[in-house]
Amino acid sequence: MYRFNAIVCGALLFCGVAFSDANIIQVQHQQIDWKTQLGNDYSPYNKRGTYYKALIELNMPSPISGDYFMGVALNGADMKRTLKNDQNQQLVYFLTSKTNTNFYMLDWPDITSQEQVIPFRLNGETVKYLPIYIWVEPGQYVPSTLFKGDIVLNIYQGSIDQTGQPEIVGGGTLSLGVKVSDKIELSIGSDQPNALSEFKVGFETLKKGEMVAYDVFVYSVDAYELTVTSKEKGRLAHELPQVKTSIPYDMSIDHQWVQFDEFGVATFRFETADINPKYQHKIKVVLGDARHAFKGKYSDRIILHASKTN
């Protein structure tokens, strides 16, 4: 795991669960909507990952005191926790009692360390809040849909290091949802994606046929459109606004010629393959006739934007 600050969970949604007389501690049910530190949905292209901090509310019908601990039941036999979408595809996540640890939360009898549960003490409270941290494994290339599932919590009386089988005295279920972002990300010449990228087109010498090339990377699991916008509508403009002379150039993307419209915009559509979420495009710019140009520096600014197709 990685070192990040946590963010606090917000929205609560009550869902009723029946408890026996022995369940003296009840977990207030919540709908947890996982977000990044910036409040964004899960992105498969975020290599670093982030924790989400949720606060679990415990309710006691009457004031009680003593030592307790809370475990989390597994939803599979392979020790992985998963959420599913409507197509039954899976998203892997982990639960921890604190950040920056390799101890994932478990339940009795799989517990081998105190860091795999949340120990707490009650001193006559009727309401108590406990933090839990949710880590969604980075780099899971899945469709931009909602993944959801339940987290089953069990509360035991006593301490984790006691002998014998502990007694369950409460519990409940949380609902967790993770929305996979449909935001297409893009970068120029690096593997650090950005939503919007731009670059300056310029030439060392103003000689017809001179060429410059740029590598563009798009990160997407869905078909996408790449929009190319030229500030100068497909021409190089002089650095001094009062000089109206311009120089034409030709641009291609993956050997397709770019035809700018009257607003300096051109759009290309690309399909994707599930096995490869990162796509590389080669942009080439070839200088036209510059013999008529005044002395000085000429340039254009190109803005690239990638978006999901409808």
Image (cartoon, helix red, strand yellow):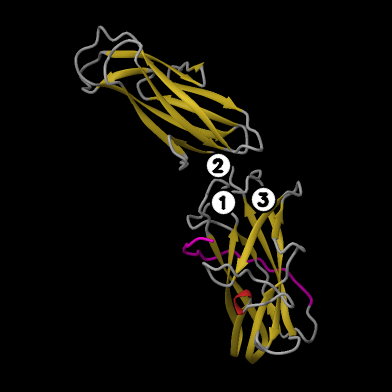
Q: Do the residues labelled 2 and 3 touch (CB within 8 Å)?
A: no
Secondary structure found at label 3: strand
Secondary structure found at label 1: loop
Q: What stretch is highlighted in magenta?
A: 1-18
User: Residue 173's image quarter?
Assistant: bottom right
- Are there few (<14), some (14-19), or many (20+) residues within 10 Å of tag 1? some
Q: How far apart are marks 1 and 3 (CA)?
A: 10 Å
Q: In the visual, does 226 lie left or right of 79?
A: left
Q: Where is residue 92 in the image (x, y as percent from the top left)?
A: 66, 56
Q: In the visual, does 238 lie left or right of 56?
A: left
Q: Do the residues labelled 1 and 2 touch (CB within 8 Å)?
A: yes
Q: Could you tell me what secondary structure mostly forms the magenta stretch?
A: loop
Q: What residue type is labelled 3?
A: Leu
Pick whichever, 93 or 31, lies toward us: 93
Q: Where is residue 252 in the image (x, y as percent from the top left)?
A: 47, 18
Q: Which amino acid does label 2 sit on?
A: Lys
User: Residue 171's image quarter?
Assistant: bottom right
- Are there few (<14), some (14-19), or many (20+) residues within 10 Å of tag 3? some
Q: Where is residue 199 in the image (x, y as percent from the top left)?
A: 37, 31
Identified at 60% across, 55% down, the residue is 137
Identified at 78% across, 79% down, the residue is 19
The residue singled out by tag 1 in the image is 41
Question: Relative to 285, is 190 above or below?
Answer: below
The residue singled out by tag 2 in the image is 183
Location of the N terminus (image quadrant): bottom right
Q: Distance between the residues labelled 2 and 3?
A: 14 Å
Identified at 23% across, 23% down, the residue is 239
Q: Where is residue 182 in the image (x, y as percent from the top left)?
A: 59, 42
The residue singled out by tag 3 in the image is 146
